[in-house]
Structure formats: structure tokens, C-alpha cells
Image (spheres, rainbow, N blue to C red):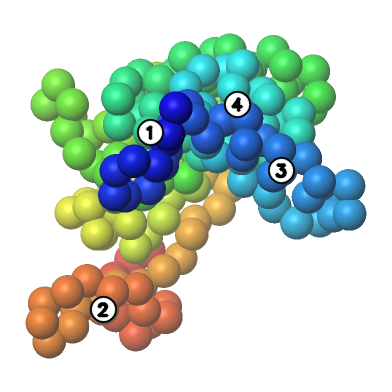
Amino acid sequence: QKLYAETGGLSGRPLRAGSTDIVLPLFPPTPGKLPIIGVGGIFNADAAWEKISAGASLVQVYTGMVYEGPGIAKKIVTGLRGKLAAGGVQLGYHNHSHELSHYDGQPALQILLDTFTRDVWMEIDTYWIQHGGGDPIAWIDKVGGRIPCVHLKDMAITLQREQRMAEVGEGILNWPGI
């Protein structure tokens, strides 16, 4: 069966095995010194564990989030919790702007925050919160004691009114407040 008959990229389950095969040779020469992000076909805890077992230090869920919504994160985290804890691995979440889309009247990021237990840390990305229409300061305050780090990026608005990443202090974010 041809997987490339239409224009556009591939994503989701057709990439699962092949993307794991790409991760496998990356870990041995860089054992823990280079972050490896496992992506492709992650719709459940077994697929995430497959990437982690191959050497990924992070996993990215994208297509699964599109098709299943923010509830997929709880399903994956619940399935991984015991396996990761046995290895001394912590779970964390880094946001982008699409988590500020609303489901059932509230932002997906709030649903995730309410879903995850307090042992799951959150990393707020200042640019992507602003890009999604949120207030970085408010979200940093919301996650409180479960935020070991903040991903600092500024936002500039071009003359064409486009949002662009900028160096910290060169854009519109409220750095004294952050």
C-alpha cells in the first residue's frame, strides 16, 4: 500500500516502527548527553514506552492529540507511570500554543493540568503561551510548585502583524513580571 499517494507529510501510526528504528542507533554514542525526542505513532503508553526503551529521553504526541484530544495524555501518563518510576524517571510536560485551544469550555492545558497528578512537572513556554492568546505570567502562577524550569522566549510583532520569536527582552513579553 502506498503511504505517499497524496500531497503533504505523513504522521501518526504509519511512522511508529520506522521512527523507533531511527532512535535506536542514536542513543549508544550519546548515552544521555543528547536529548532524543521519540515521535511518530504515539497513541498509547506502549508506543511511548517503545520510544523510551529505544533511547528517547522525551516523547512527543501530536497526531494522537489531534484525533483523541487532551485525554490521550492522561492515558499515556497513567500507562507509563509505574515503568518510569521503577527506573527513577520523572514525567514532565512542555506546552505549545495549541494547548490553549478550548475543549468543553476550557483550555486543553488546563485540562492537562487538572488531569496530571502533582508529580508530573510542567514547563511553561512563554512564547507559545503568548502565541496561543494566553498570559505567560498567569500560567506560570497556575502551575505553581510543579514548574522546575520555564522556557524563555520573547515574541515580536512584525510590520505585517505576524508573530515571530525574538530574543528575550527584544519583544513584547512582560519580562519584569515573568
Query: CA separation, marks 3 and 4?
Result: 12 Å
Q: Nearer the viewer, mark 1 or mark 2?
A: 1
Q: First in sequence, mark 1 or 2: give its number.
A: 1
Please tell me the numbered disc located at residue 156: 2
Give, as a three-letter code, the residue at label 1: Thr
Q: Which residue is mark 3?
A: 23
Q: Secondary structure at mark 3?
A: helix
Nearer to us: label 3 or label 4: 3
Q: Please tell me which residue lies in front, 116 or 39.
A: 39
Horizontal side of residue 178 vs 80, given as left or right: left
As drawn, the label of residue 48 is 4
Residue type at the position of mark 3: Val
Please report whichever mark, 3 or 2, sits nearer to the chain's N-terminal start: 3
Circle 1 residue: 63
x and y percent of residue 66 in the render? 30, 31
Q: Are marks 3 and 2 in contact (CB under 8 Å)?
A: no
